[in-house]
Image (spheres, grey):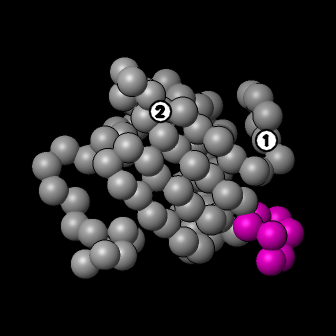
Amino acid sequence: MNDPTLRPVLGVDPFLFDHERLQALASEPVLRRGMAYFRENRVLSLGWDKSRLWAEVEGSVKDQPYLVDVALDEDREPLVCCTCPFDYEPA
């Protein structure tokens, strides 16, 4: 199983967030939009390893997906980078 998108989750997944932890990272409108994108099957690809998660997400412009990268710093806190047209709250 070399494909990271097919790798089973064993033990504690560092990218498994409960609602409370997600709320500490983003506002409720941003969380709702992210969940809607997921439900609408707009996550085009997803991969991860033990310290990083990356994805392509279909945005508002056809054939120009957003690139999302989430890494963990030395304290295992998420560092997020996204090519989406979003800078700061509110959204």
Task: Work out whether 21 lies above or below 57.
Answer: above
Q: Please identify the quadrant where the C terminus is shown.
A: top right
Main secondary structure type of the part rendered in magenta: loop
Residue positioned 61% across, 31% down in the render:
27
Q: Which of marks 1 and 2 is nearer the N terminus?
A: 2
Q: Nearer the viewer, residue 76 or 23?
A: 76
Few, some or many residues within 10 Å of mark 2 (<14, 14–19, 20+): some
Q: Nearer the viewer, residue 82 or 19?
A: 82
- The residue to which callout 1 is attached is 86
* Residue 91 showing in the rendered view: yes
Residue 47 image position (x, y, % from top left): 45, 64
Task: Work out whether 87 lies above or below 11.
Answer: above
In the image, the segment drawn in magenta is 59-65
Q: Which of 3 and 17 is in front in this view?
A: 3
Q: Distance between the residues labelled 1 and 2?
A: 17 Å
Residue 14 image position (x, y, % from top left): 31, 41
Q: Confirm whether the magenta stretch covers residue 61.
A: yes
Residue 35: which quarter of the image? bottom right
Label 2: element kind: strand
Return the mark for residue 78: 2
Residue 70 image position (x, y, % from top left): 52, 44
